[in-house]
Image: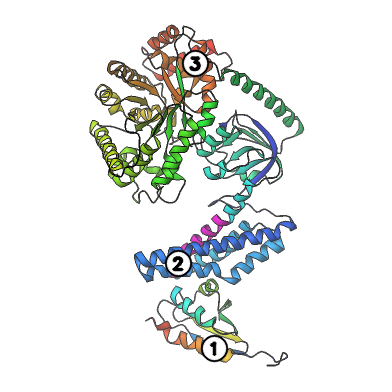
């Protein structure tokens, strides 16, 4: 029995046999297969070799066109390498004789060859090991890709154990047969986590090497609420988790009862709870949890899930699908907000030294107008006859906002010229997530229809803390008085200008901050769909009076520690079961 | 041709003359030529051997300039294969 702690990505308890998927660029565990699986493994190998060869052939043609035949010759060589008969023979032998998986056998054979190259004195030949690495990675990716395809056709319920799962794999999962996820990498906001929550499947991520701790078919327990995974549990442990599973279901049913009740404080003020989504299909699920609309539709997924820039039609289809899933409820589409660190190669070859302060998000869009216009065209077309609003992220100066708006107008004119129907009167708003925008929120409020506070970035930029950097992550706290003062000012600016202000960062979904935010004057909160029921529960058990008194008190604190302790005490008063 | 005919086995030694040795392009040419014959050709260098149709194995011979190699051909057209391949090596793969 091995117990491991990871990050709780999606709540709930799952118990079942593990299906272990191997990973790209990751140590492939030595795993033996059943003799009956040998032919399938060999077919997988052959298909992967063939796909890799085709890929290289395409690369060769493209390289010859762009860079000349000499460079293209390298791809020819890779192609020949992959078609190398003795290589295949050696791998097939390892599969047949040792019953190793295709991935492991291929990796081993390549390792053997790479070792030989590393030991040569000749520098030219020594360098060739890079070519071998490249080939190895390419073929392994296809072998593993094929293995992964099998997870969409499961025949019995399993817990998926993998290094990582791509969003497209996760979304195509057979819900009836996937009990839970245990994943080596990722965090609470990784796609696997989001999709697991959406599918209501318990998941634990950031387990580092869970794929090596368990073999296929062994029993595994996933406690997605607490971020714990138990491989090969004993009978007592299984029994204990069966009880937790029942408790969790009861808790869920209790929250489900809240779904159709309004989010109204005890003194009768309605708080609009909305949902943040990443995938079009998530909108439906979000509304099912009781959200009144989509306060933030992140469009980055579209750009990250493909190797090339999505076409206008592809984007239009995705946005239209979100509109359909939103069933007439408001849908705020945020324009592409990719950080430089997430830029895929087709977007940018440069790597900023300091991505958070670099060419990202709206800045990137404004310097790549063709891409941006295509994006806006798709949004405007999808917005036709629907309550779609556009939100620009990462604004620091008024100039940027005006440039973005004028680009939007240009696009509208183009659409008019092309006689393509689109939404003419779409509402335009902005994210307030830089201290600059927060400090000038009075000026910004005059130029937009709504403002939404992105507390994650606002905190990062105000406190100069990258929370992905574990050495400073402890300094990241959205309840730091400096951040809270900015939030208060934004709300006031919105009030003065008669502009709606909402919060769509993680603060909005954290029970501890709920009363404080309402007390600061916020009436709209947009959060992860799974957070909606719990936040609604808090709204329904508090009053505006109480919230305002909490906010007044908090704004007098100078240290984030004081704020934290006070808010924890206050939350316990209305929600004694609260885990924090 | 008789089924019982013993296969012809021929071999020839030579030295890699070109500066870059047996690297990508020479190997491609070598494989190209070798695969035109039905003879089974192997290349040996010290204690290592390679199938003449396997670029990866040939590269792994790490035959740099001045390396002594032995080409072995087995089969009906062994003589022709050997001649063609050794000639290719001796002309330095038309490189230098």
| Disc 2 from disc 1: Cα separation | 28 Å
For this orientation, the residue located farthest to the front is A419
Contact check, label 1 and label 3, Cβ < 8 Å = no
Q: Return the residue nearer the eye: A46 or A282.
A: A282
Q: Return the residue nearer the eye: A3 or A505.
A: A505
Q: Residue A263 carries which label?
A: 3
| Disc 1 from disc 3: Cα separation | 86 Å
Which residue is label 1 attached to? B82
Q: Which of the two discs, 2 and 3, sits closer to the camera?
A: 3
Mark 3 lies on a secondary structure that is loop
Which residue is label 2 attached to? A75
Question: Residue B39, position in %: x, y?
Answer: 60, 85
Label 3 neighbourhood size at 10 Å, few (<14), some (14-19), many (20+)?
Answer: many
- The subunit carrying tag 3 is A
Q: Give the range drawn in magenta.
A: A124-142
Q: Name the residue: 26% across, 21% down.
A: A442
- The subunit carrying tag 1 is B
Q: Does the magenta stretch include residue A108?
A: no
Q: Choose top left, top right, bottom left or bottom right for residue A459.
A: top left
| Disc 2 from disc 3: Cα separation | 61 Å
Q: Name the residue: 46% across, 82% down.
A: B16
Question: Residue A216, position in %: x, y?
Answer: 69, 46
Q: In this view, does A502 lie to the left or right of B61?
A: left
């Amino acid at each position: 029995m091995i117990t491991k702690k990871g990050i709780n990505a999606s709540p709930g308890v799952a118990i079942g046999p593990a299906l272990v998927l191997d990973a790209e660029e990751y140590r492939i565990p030595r795993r033996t297969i059943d003799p009956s699986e040998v032919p399938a493994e060999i077919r997988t190998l052959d298909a992967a070799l063939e796909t890799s060869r085709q890929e290289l052939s395409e690369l060769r043609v493209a390289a010859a066109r762009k860079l000349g035949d000499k460079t293209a010759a390298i791809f020819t060589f890779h192609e020949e390498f992959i078609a190398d008969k003795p290589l295949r023979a050696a791998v097939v032998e390892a599969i047949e004789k040792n019953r190793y998986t295709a991935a492991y056998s291929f990796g081993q054979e390549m390792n053997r060859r790479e070792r030989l190259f590393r030991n040569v004195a000749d520098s030219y030949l020594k360098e060739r090991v890079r070519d071998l690495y490249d080939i190895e990675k390419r073929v392994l990716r296809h072998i593993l890709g094929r293995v992964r395809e099998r997870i969409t056709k499961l025949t019995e319920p399993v817990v998926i154990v993998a290094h990582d799962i791509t969003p497209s794999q996760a979304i195509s999962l057979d819900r009836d047969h996937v009990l839970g996820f245990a994943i080596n990498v990722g965090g609470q906001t990784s796609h696997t986590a989001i999709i697991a929550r959406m599918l209501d499947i318990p998941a634990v991520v950031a387990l580092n090497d869970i794929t090596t701790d368990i073999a296929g078919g062994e029993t595994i327990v996933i406690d997605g609420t607490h971020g714990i995974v138990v491989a090969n549990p004993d009978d007592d442990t299984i029994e204990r988790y069966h009880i937790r599973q029942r408790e969790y279901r009861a808790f869920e049913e209790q929250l489900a009862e809240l779904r159709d009740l309004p989010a109204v404080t005890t003194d009768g003020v309605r708080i609009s709870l909305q949902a943040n989504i990443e995938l079009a299909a998530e909108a439906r699920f979000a509304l099912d949890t009781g959200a009144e609309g989509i306060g933030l539709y992140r469009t980055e997924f579209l750009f990250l899930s493909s190797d090339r820039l999505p076409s206008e039609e592809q984007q239009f289809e995705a946005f239209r699908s979100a509109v359909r899933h939103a069933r007439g409820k408001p849908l705020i589409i945020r324009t592409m907000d990719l950080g430089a660190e997430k830029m895929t190669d087709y977007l940018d070859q440069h790597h900023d030294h300091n991505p958070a302060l670099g060419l990202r998000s709206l800045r990137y869009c404004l310097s790549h107008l063709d891409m941006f216009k295509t994006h806006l065209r798709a949004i405007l077309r999808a917005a036709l006859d629907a309550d779609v609003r556009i939100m620009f992220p990462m604004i620091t100066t008024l100039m940027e906002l005006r440039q973005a708006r004028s680009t939007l107008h240009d696009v509208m004119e183009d659409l008019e010229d092309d006689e393509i129907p689109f939404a003419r009167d779409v509402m335009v708003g902005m994210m307030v997530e830089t201290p600059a925008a927060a400090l000038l929120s009075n000026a910004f409020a005059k130029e937009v229809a709504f403002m939404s506070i992105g507390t994650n970035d606002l905190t990062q930029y105000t406190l100069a803390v990258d929370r992905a950097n574990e050495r400073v992550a402890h300094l990241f706290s959205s309840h730091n008085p400096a951040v809270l003062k900015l939030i208060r000012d934004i709300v006031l600016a919105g009030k003065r200008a008669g502009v709606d202000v909402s919060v769509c960062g993680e603060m909005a979904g954290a029970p501890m901050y709920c009363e404080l935010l309402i007390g600061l004057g916020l009436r709209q909160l947009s959060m992860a769909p799974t957070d909606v029921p719990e936040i609604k529960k808090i709204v329904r058990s508090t009053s505006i009076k109480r919230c305002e008194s909490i906010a007044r008190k908090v704004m007098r604190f100078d240290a984030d520690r004081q704020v934290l302790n006070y808010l924890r005490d206050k939350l316990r008063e209305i929600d004694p079961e609260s885990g924090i | 041709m008789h089924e019982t005919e013993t296969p012809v086995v021929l071999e020839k030694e030579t030295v890699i003359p070109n500066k870059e040795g047996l690297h990508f392009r020479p190997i491609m040419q070598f494989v190209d030529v070798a695969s035109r014959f039905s003879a089974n050709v192997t290349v040996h260098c010290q204690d290592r051997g390679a199938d003449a149709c396997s670029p990866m194995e040939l590269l792994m011979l790490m035959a740099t300039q001045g390396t002594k190699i032995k080409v072995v051909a087995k089969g009906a057209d062994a003589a022709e294969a050997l001649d063609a391949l050794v000639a290719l090596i001796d002309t330095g793969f038309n490189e230098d």
